[in-house]
Image (spheres, rainbow, N blue to C red):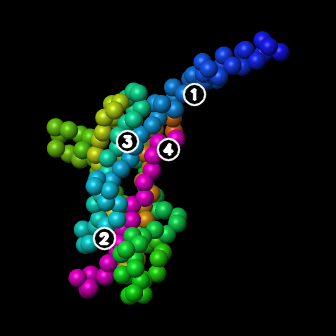
Amino acid sequence: MRTLFTLIMALIVNGIPPANNALNEVSQNCSAELSVEKNRSFKSADEDGANFKLILKNTSSSRNSYVIKTSMASSPCSNKNASARSNKKGSSIKNSNLNISFNSNESRGTGKKQSSNLISIEAGQTKEFTITATAPNGTPYNTWGCIKVEAVSDNCKTTSDEIILSVFVPDPSEN
């Protein structure tokens, strides 16, 4: 009994080694941070749309590639301050469908922007890319469209980070 107690105390004091070092290594090589420049995740879509500059940082210990996936968020979103103004004009908080495009400056030196949604980043480095949202013809005015952007590690096939972008579709006659 005393030997068992000594063994347990030794494990507690020295720390219990992880059961699967390979699993820890894989999870460390899949991490990333996704953010919006200046934390501006709420914008209005004018005639040219709404452009969001996103920053992806590879927080893993080695080079990694990330697939950027976009989809319309399933739950309603809005800028609470702006939605209070727009609700006075009869706006309902529902998601409007938006056209979404992706642009990256991955092709340095060529002068061409890359439209592929795969970004490769060295450990500890960042890359910037742009998500543009436009309202298709017939989209109701004074509504919100909410875009879910995910960075999925190509090594692990899991979502490393995600963010929601909120786009307000204003009535152009009220400018």
Q: Is residue 159 above or below residue 170?
A: above
Tell me which label, 1 or 4, sits earlier in the chain. 1
Q: Given contact means CB atoms under 8 Å apart, are the residues at marks 1 and 3 in contact?
A: no
Q: Nearer the viewer, mark 3 or mark 4?
A: 4
Q: Is residue 35 above or below residue 49?
A: above
Mark 1 lies on residue: 23
Q: Nearer the viewer, mark 1 or mark 4?
A: 1
Question: Considering depth in this image, is 35 or 139 the residue closer to the camera?
Answer: 35
- Residue type, label 4: Thr
CA–CA distance in space, label 2 to label 4: 27 Å
Residue at 32% in and 47% down: 55
Residue at 39% in and 70% down: 79
- Residue 159, label in figure: 4
- Residue 144, label in figure: none
Tell me which label, 3 or 4, sits earlier in the chain. 3
Asked if one can make out residue 130 in the rendered structure from this viewpoint, the answer is no
Please name the predominant secondary structure of the magenta segment in the image: strand
Q: Residues within 10 Å of mark 1 (few under 14, many from 20)?
A: few
Residue at 45% in and 46% down: 161
> Is 127 included in the stretch rendered in magenta?
no
Q: Is residue 44 left or right of residue 153?
A: left
Q: Position of residue 122 (x, y in %)?
A: 33, 31
- Residue 118, label in figure: 3
Mark 2 lies on residue: 44
CA–CA distance in space, label 2 to label 3: 27 Å
Asked if one can make out residue 117 in the rendered structure from this viewpoint, the answer is yes
